[in-house]
Image (tube, grey):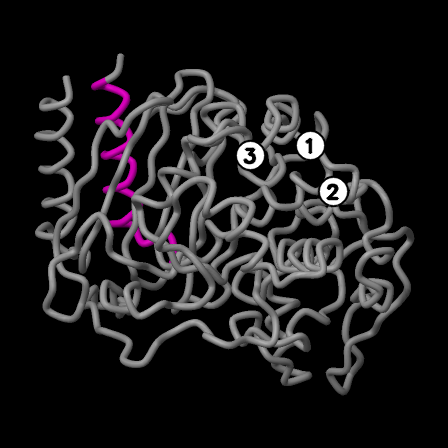
Amino acid sequence: MGETLKDAADAILRRGVERAPGLPGVVAVATDRERTLYAGAAGQRGDGAPMTTDTVMAIFSTTKAVTATAALQLAEEGRLDLDAPAAAYVPALAEIQVLDGFARDGAPRLRPPARPITTRMLLLHTAGFGYDIFNEAYARLLRETRRPGVTSGTRAALMTPLLFDPGESWEYGSSIDWAGQVVEAVTGQHLGRVMRERIFDPLGMESTGFALTPAMRARLARMHQRAEDGTLTVLDGFELPQAPEVEMGGHGLYSTAEDYLRFIRLWLNDGAGPHGPVLRPETVAMAATNGLGPSLKIRALPGVKRHLSHEAEFFPGMPKSWGLSFMINDEDAPTGRSAGSLAWAGLANLYFWIDRTKGVGGFWGTQAFPFADPAAVENFLEFETAVYRSVS
């Protein structure tokens, strides 16, 4: 069985690199609750070296689930009330207002929110924050006010208004960056240190962090940009801030596929790590449940900044919910993924899923913009399908 999956997955990754328009280098891993089912890579890192399973990548929004895990740990301990006003922990949140259009001169019109933001809303993306990559109002806001984007790692980048009153809709955005600030306020530590002590060290994730160590940098993949004609170019000098004012819990981590697989296995095992519990089973069950209610569903992400993202939607036409903090497919997916599975992605075309029903999960990654690259999505879904065929 293992050899069959290896042959199939190796061929899929090779096709991803060799078949036009092609990908620079890809890595994919899969696991059940106990062991790695597959680990492989194809193509190049971008510096002449081959892509490997321990290649370090900027993992962007796959950071979010890690930040959520830290918040859930604090909630278990009674140190964080998910349903209390988050401004009780981070007073700056009390300053945030709702965007109510723009004046003729382009200035944003603001009003007070109808209710406070809670940490649960932050984890569910129902607080009202957005991203300029996926929301035209936010893109205009940043243009009109010359406000820095979240990848700047600055506190000013967080001080954006809400798109609606907290709790009234779903909008993918910078909420988890604020959740990271809640974690810092509760613990009195930087987010990276909290993650290192509470998640990375217990799981053996030695190549994950906001800052690149010399050992990580030696295995770092280069970022690529795909042009409209399909060609790929290395983005010389691209790097997330290494000494940011704010360690952004929504997108700031570097990691490897091997490390992230350890995190996936934690969620497959109801919060149990190799050396003891990291989360309680009841916490995992709660976080893995639809938190949006029966009527609210997540939407496709519009590609407002086309050099950074196409329009993005997983399994178009299928209803999808959100947990704390993962996408949940409400129906069985054509790849074999069970209804109720957890998943999400990162801007540079990184994708993962966690199927707690069938006890299998995986991670697929490359380093290329824009997000939802058709060649990347196709290759990821082919890989996921091969994994399910091997375990059925």
Res. 70 image quadrant: top right
Verify whether residue 375 appears in magenta: yes
| Residue at 60% in and 36% down | 322
Q: Residue at x 39, y 40 (%)?
A: 352
Tag count: 3
Looking at the image, residue 169 lies above or below residue 99: above
Q: Where is residue 16 drawn, in percent x and y?
A: 16, 47
Kind of residue at badge 3: Val
Q: Nearer the viewer, residue 155 or 193?
A: 193
Tell me which label, 3 or 2, sits earlier in the chain: 2
Nearer-the-camera pick, 307 or 78: 78
Residue 37 is covered by the magenta coloring: no
Of mark 2 and mark 1, the one earlier in the sequence is 2
Tell me the residue that label 3 is attached to. Answer: 278
Q: Is residue 104 above or below residue 254?
A: below
- Pointers 2 and 1 in contact (CB under 8 A)? yes
Residue indicated by mark 2: 120
Give me the residue at 35% from left, 38% from top: 261
Disc 1 from disc 3: Cα separation: 22 Å
- What is the three-letter code of the residue carrying label 2? Arg
Above or below, 195 relative to 254 = above
Q: Which residue is mark 1?
A: 291
Magenta-colored span: 371-390
Q: Position of residue 341 (x, y in %)?
A: 48, 26
Q: Nearer the viewer, mark 2 or mark 1?
A: 2
SS at badge 1 = loop
Q: Disc 3 and disc 2: Cα gap in Å? A: 20 Å
Comparing marks 1 and 3, which lies closer to the viewer?
3
